[in-house]
């Protein structure tokens, strides 16, 4: 059964950077669609970035070139490099794994990111 574990969240000042990691225990990792979503208090969960098995990525409109999603199939890990973080990026960030792509997929437990001076 698939299992996701995120790490890398924390407190950072505005303009700072964080790299989130998500280790996925799944035999079909290299074929899966992987994503990062976030949910701020009182708001709906929103897409941050998604990457397919070919390495093509799509980002939420708010990213504006600040974040990069990547994957390492040899480590069953997906990353989210976040630069120039702003207070509005404060949220719980969730990793998402989907294989096949037509299924709802599974979620990690989330990692908290706080951006504050």
Image: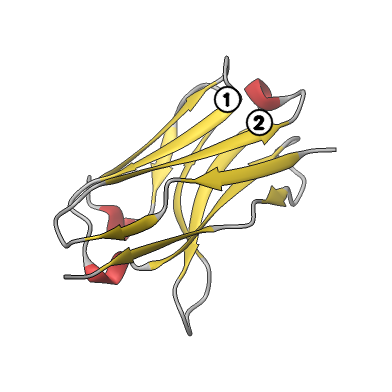
Q: Quadrant of the C terminus?
A: bottom left
Residue situated furthest bottom in the rendering: 42
Residue 53: mark: 1
Number of numbered discs on residues? 2
Residue situated furthest top in the rendering: 74
Q: Secondary structure at mark 2?
A: loop
Residue nearest the viewer, comparing 105 with 77: 77
Residue 32: mark: 2
Task: State whether residue 6 is above or below residue 87.
Answer: above
Residue nearest the viewer, comparing 12 with 97: 12
Residue nearest the viewer, comparing 19 with 70: 19
Task: State whether residue 98 is above or below residue 86.
Answer: above
Mark 2 and mark 1 lie on one chain; the one further toward the N terminus is 2
Rendered image quadrant of residue 114: bottom left
Residue 18 position, x and y percent, is 30, 46
Residue 49 position, x and y percent, is 44, 47
Q: Quadrant of the N terminus?
A: top right
Crowd class of label 1 (few under 14; some 14 to 19; many from 20; radius 10 Å): some
Crowd class of label 2 (few under 14; some 14 to 19; many from 20; radius 10 Å): many
Residue 79 position, x and y percent, is 44, 36
- Residue drawn 52% across and 21% down? 54
- Residue drawn 50% across and 46% down? 7
- Residue drawn 52% across and 75% down? 44
Q: Is residue 4 left or right of residue 110?
A: right
Q: Contact (CB < 8 A) between labels 2 and 1?
A: yes
Cα–Cα gap, marks 2 and 1: 6 Å
Residue 68: mark: none
The coloring applied to the image is secondary structure
Q: Is residue 95 left or right of residue 84?
A: right
Q: Is residue 76 left or right of residue 61?
A: right
Q: Secondary structure at mark 1?
A: loop
């Amino acid at each position: 059964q698939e299992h996701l574990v995120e790490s890398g969240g924390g407190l950072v000042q505005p303009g700072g950077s964080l790299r989130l990691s998500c280790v996925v225990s799944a035999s079909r990792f290299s074929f899966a669609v992987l994503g990062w979503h976030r949910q701020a208090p009182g708001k709906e969960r929103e897409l941050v970035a998604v990457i397919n098995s070919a390495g093509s990525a799509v980002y939420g409109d708010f990213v504006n070139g600040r974040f990069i999603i990547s994957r390492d199939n040899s480590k069953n890990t997906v990353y989210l490099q976040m630069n120039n973080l702003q207070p509005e990026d404060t949220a719980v960030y969730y990793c998402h794994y989907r294989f096949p792509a037509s299924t709802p997929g599974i979620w990690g437990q989330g990692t908290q990111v706080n951006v504050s001076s």
